[in-house]
Image (cartoon, grey):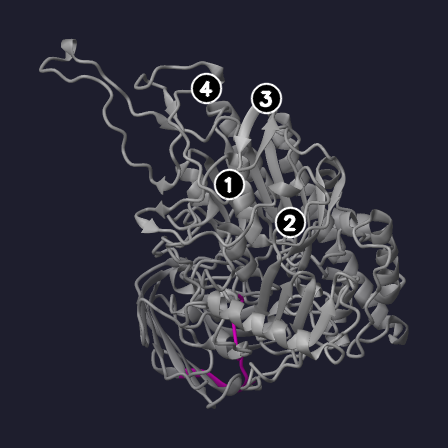
Amino acid sequence: MSGFAWKGLAIVSTFPAVLTIAVCGAMAQGTSLPSGAPGATMTIDGRYLPNPPPSFGGDIQTNADRSKPSWPGLVVPPKGAPNVLLIMTDDVGFSAPSTFGGVIPTPTLDRIASEGLRYTRMHTTALCSPTRAALLTGHNHHSVATGVVVDQATGYPGYNSIIPRDAVAIGEILRQNGYDTSWYGKDHNTPQWAASQAGPFTDWPTGPVKGFDYYYGFIGDDASQWQPNNLFRNTTPIQPYLDHPGWNLTTAMADEAIARINMLNDVQPDRPFMIYYAPGGTHAPHHPTPEWVDKISAMHLFDDGWNKLRETIFANQKKLGVIPENAELTVWPDTLPQWDTLSAEEKKLFIRQADVYAAYLAYTDYEIGRVVQAVEDVGKLDNTLIIYISGDNGASPEGTLNGLFNEYAAANAVSPTIDQNMQFYDVWGTDQSYPHFAVGWAWAWATPYQWTKEVASHFGGTRNGMAISWPARIKDEGGIRNQFHHVIDVVPTILEAAGLPQPVSVNGVAQRPIEGVSMAYTFDDANAPDRRTTQYFEMFGSRAIYHDGWVAAAPPPDAPWILSLAPPPKDVMNGFKWELYDTNKDWTEAHDLADAEPDKLRDMQQLFTMEATKYRVFPLDDSRLGRFISDKPSYAPGRTEFVYDGTIMNVLLSGAGNAPSLLNRSYTITADVEIPSGGAEGVLMTDGGRFAGYGFYLLKGVPVFTWDLVDLERAKWRGKEALAPGKHTIEFDWKYDGPGLGKGGTGTLKVDGTVVDSHPMPKSLPITLAWDETFNVGIDTGTSVDDADYAVPFPFTGTIDKVTVKLGPSEE
C-alpha cells in the first residue's frame, strides 16, 4: 500500500487493499480517556457498517457498588481525517468560468485552483441525475440505475432510478464513520413516486441509501430561485420566500450551510463534517439578483457575440495551460447561426440572455465563496478537502435556437420566437421569467470542444472543470493536473483522504466494489501515469468509449435542441455513425480518424459493448418524450378518483401519481363548499403556477378556472356572479379531443348543476406542468396561475367540504 506524510501523521492509502483500523481511545482536544470512560471515542474498522456492537468492557456484579461501568465509545473518523466540502454546480460548460479560460468571473473557483490543483480532464455523464448518482456513489451511472434523469426512469436495472442498496452513497459511509453529513441544494435522485411528503423517505437525502444527517434543498430538475415551491428542510416542505420580497435561494442556501458550520464549531468543534453543496446555478431558470445583472452587464463581456467569444476563450485557455499549445479549436457547426448573420434585435436579445446567465454563474460562485470563507473563519480550512466541480455536464442546449423566456415552453415542445422572447426582455432573470439562453452560447461555453449537455459522445457534453484544495496536504499550489478522470473517482478519493476503507457491508447488504479510482495519487505528482485508462459514456444512445487516449464516439443523429413530438429512430445500436479520435495527439477531438483507422474503430466499438454489458447500459434507448411521460411505479396504480377533505399543500409531481394529472385526458373537478355570510374567495385546487399549470378558485366570490399555457396565453372559464352564502357545488368538466398529445377540448363550468360558462380551448399542455410547483387544495404555495387575479397563498376563506377529481382514460 502507498502512503503519504501529512503533518507528521502517516495516512495509509486504503486502495485497493482494505485497511483495518484499530479501535482507539482518542479524546477531543487531544486528551485521552481509557476505553469505556464517558466521552471516550473509537475509530471503527469501517468495513462493516454499522459497526458490530462492542463487547462490554466493564464488570457486572449483583450490586452496583462492586461493579464497573463501561460506555461504548463514540464513533469518530481516523485521527486527522479532513473535513470535506464537495461542490457541484449545474449545467456549467467547461469554458464558462474564468478558471478554465472563460470570461465570467468565478473568483471562488479561481481561489480553490490557486490554493490547490486545477484538473483539466475531469468527466461527467452529460446529464444531471446520472452524474450526481455517479458522484455520490463512486459507481457508473447505469450501475446505480440512473442511466437518464429520474423523470425518464424505465423498468430496467440501469434505468429504474432506484440507487441499489449494494452501492450506498458517500454520505452514509461517512455518517456511520462519525462524520456530520449535510446536503444543500439540488436532489434530482429521488424516484418520482417517492418524491412527495408522503414518502417513503428511504431514497431521500436523509435516507439510509444516501445517508445525510441534514438536508436543505429542492427535489427535482430545477427550481425558481425566487419562489422555489419544491423546497424542503429534511422531508418537510417549506416556503421561506412568502412575504419576503427579494429572497433568493442561492443566498439562502449559503446561509443555511454557514449556519451549520458555525453550529458544529460551537457544539462539536472536533467532529469532522462533510458538506455536499449543490446549488441550482446555473441550470435554468437563470435567476441572479438585479445587482449581479447590473455588474455583469456593465462589463460588456458578450457584445461581440459567440463566435468571437470562442476565440477569446481559446486564447485564454492556452495562456492558463488548461489546454496544450497544439490544441485546435473545433469547427463551428452548420446547424447554428454565425453571430454576424443575426439581426440587431436577435443580438440584443442574445446578449441579454448571456448577461443574465453570466450574472447567475458569478452570483453562484460568490455564494459558494461565502461558504468557503465560513470554513476559514472557524479555523478549519487547512484540514478541509474541497472538491469544486464546475458543472454536472456540459453547457445546456435546452434553450433552443432562440432562447427561452420560460423553460416550460421547451418542455412542452414549444419554441418561442424572437418576438415572444422580446416581450420578456425587461424582466429576463426576474421572478417574472423562467429563462434560458440560446444554443449558440452553449456551444461557445464548450470551447474548445464539440457538442453540449445531453451528448455523451464528445467532451463538450462530458468534460467539466474541477479544482481541488487541501492546504494541509496539497502543496503544489496552482498546479495543473491532466490525468483523465471521471466523477466516479471522487468517492474513493474522499475515502483515501479520510483513511477509510471501502465498506464490505452496509446496513446488512453486501456492497459491490466501488468502480472509481482514487485521485490522491495526483496530489504530489503532476506527471503520474493515469490510473483511469478506460471509461465508457452513454446518454440517449449517444455514446463513447475512452481507452488509453483513444476515443470512439457515436454522436446523436439529431441535435438535442431540436424539439419534436415524433418518436426517435428504433435502431439505436446501429443508427448512429461512429467517429474515432486519438486524443494523445488531438486534445480537442478535432480530427475524425474513423475512415483511416477502421480496425482501431472496430476494436473500440467492441470494447464499448463489453463495458456497456458490464455496467448495465443495455438496452440502448433514444426516446426522450416517451420515457418522460411513460407509466412509472405508483402507490395508487390506475387511480382515477381523488377525494380531498379540506386543505392539502405542496404535493410534488402530479404526473408521478402523487396527485391527479389532468394532461391528455378528460376529467371532472367537483368542489363542495360552504360560503359564509360575508362571501368567500380563494383557491379551491391548483397545480403549477406562473409559467404553466391550472387554477380553480373563487375571485371576489366568482368561480374561475384558468389554464396557463406556458405564460404565452391563458384560457379562462368564469361564473356570472358571486356565490351567495350557503352550500354550493362548483364543477369544471373538460372533454378532451384526443387521442394524441396536447390536443384541445371543451371546458364547462357549472354552479349547482347550472352551466355558467362553456367554450373550447384549441390546445392544451402535452407534456408537463411546472415541476417546481406543487399540487394544492384550499391554498396556493408557489406562484399563481395568473398574477392579475391573485397573489399567493390566497387561502380559501369559506369551507371546503370535499374536492373530488375524476379522471378519464389517458389518451396519449
Q: Secondary structure at mark 1?
A: helix
Q: Which residue is mark 4?
A: 28
Q: Quadrant of residue 652?
A: bottom left
Question: Residue 114: horizontal and vertical position, in percent?
Answer: 75, 38
Region in magenta: 755-770
> Closer to the observer: label 3 or label 1?
3
Q: Is residue 96 above or below residue 1?
A: below
Question: Residue 65: horizontal and vertical position, in percent?
Answer: 15, 9
Q: Quadrant of residue 453?
A: bottom right
Label drawn at residue 547? none
Q: Amino acid at mark 4?
A: Ala
Q: Which residue is mark 3?
A: 8
> Closer to the observer: label 2 or label 3?
3
Label drawn at residue 495? 1
Q: Amino acid at mark 2?
A: Ile
Residue placed most toward the observer, 79 or 359: 79
